Image (spheres, grey):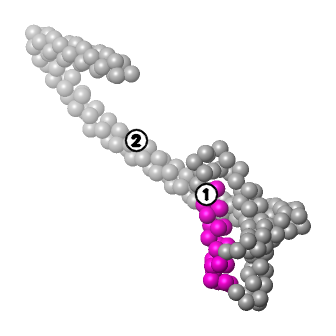
Amino acid sequence: MSLSTQLVTMLSMIAGGLSTGFMLDTFRRFSPYWRNRKIMIYVMEVGFWTSQTLLLFYILFLVNGGEIRLYIVLACLLGFSMYQAILSYYYKKLLEHFIRIALAIYRFFSRLIQVFIISPIKGIVMVIYTIFIWVLKLLLSLLLFVLTVIVTPIQWLLRGFYQLLPKKVQGILLQIAGFYSTIKNNLSKVWENIRWKRR
């Protein structure tokens, strides 16, 4: 390699070390969100260091064709050390500031959507639901009224017809009605027992 290539390589690796420091602090800042998941920790750690290694090698490939020498590794460590000694504290402060700004923007738009979109939609749905229930109750009331108007005269006619029947026939009808009532009660008890056993 020529001297100029070596100089560019060293400067690139120093910059690569600095960028690794930035990325590492950023990664560590967000790592508490998955620290309770061991598999997630493993995946994220492997993914982070693999991506950083590939990034550094790509930079190295661009500047000198991918040749690795001791001074290149030392330049990368120098850049990382410079970041840790000089820039790490200020970057963490700046990162926290940006996170607070991002959270404030998120909360603002979330509240905006809640007030102007979600709440009105919920209100409209509740109004439609209330109207629907009211109309349904009204229709049921009308249906019951119509059935009452139709059934009541029929009941009167049947009662009058029943009174005209001979006593013997009335007794037979009463026995049939009692038998039907007994069957209905027994079936109801069996059904209740089945439901109780299922529980």
What's the residue type where badge 1 is placed?
Answer: Val
174 vs 30, nearest the viewer: 30
Judged left or right of residue 126, residue 167 is: left
Judged left or right of residue 166, residue 109 is: right
Q: Does dot 1 land on a helix, a strand or a loop? A: helix
The image quarter in which residue 75 lies: bottom right
Residue at mark 2: 141
Residue at mark 1: 46
Measured in 3D between alpha carbons, the distance from the residue under mark 2 to the one under mark 1, in whole angstroms, is 69 Å
User: Is 44 above or below relative to 163?
Assistant: below
Percent coordinates x, y for residue 32 in the rendering: 71, 50
Q: Does dot 2 land on a helix, a strand or a loop? A: helix
Identity of the residue drawn at 30% across and 19% down: 194
Label 1 Cα neighbours within 10 Å, binned few <14 / some 14-19 / many ≥20: few
CB atoms at circles 2 and 1 under 8 Å apart? no
User: Is 74 above or below relative to 196?
Assistant: below
Identity of the residue drawn at 77% across and 79% down: 10
SS majority, magenta: helix
Percent coordinates x, y for residue 108 in the rendering: 74, 63
Identity of the residue drawn at 70% across and 87% down: 1
Percent coordinates x, y for residue 196 in the rendering: 36, 18
Count of picture labels: 2
Judged left or right of residue 60, residue 74 is: right
Quadrant into which the C terminus falls? top left
Residue stretch in magenta: 45-67
Residue 187 in sight = yes
| Pointer 2 or 1: first along the chain | 1
Q: Which mark is residue 159?
A: none
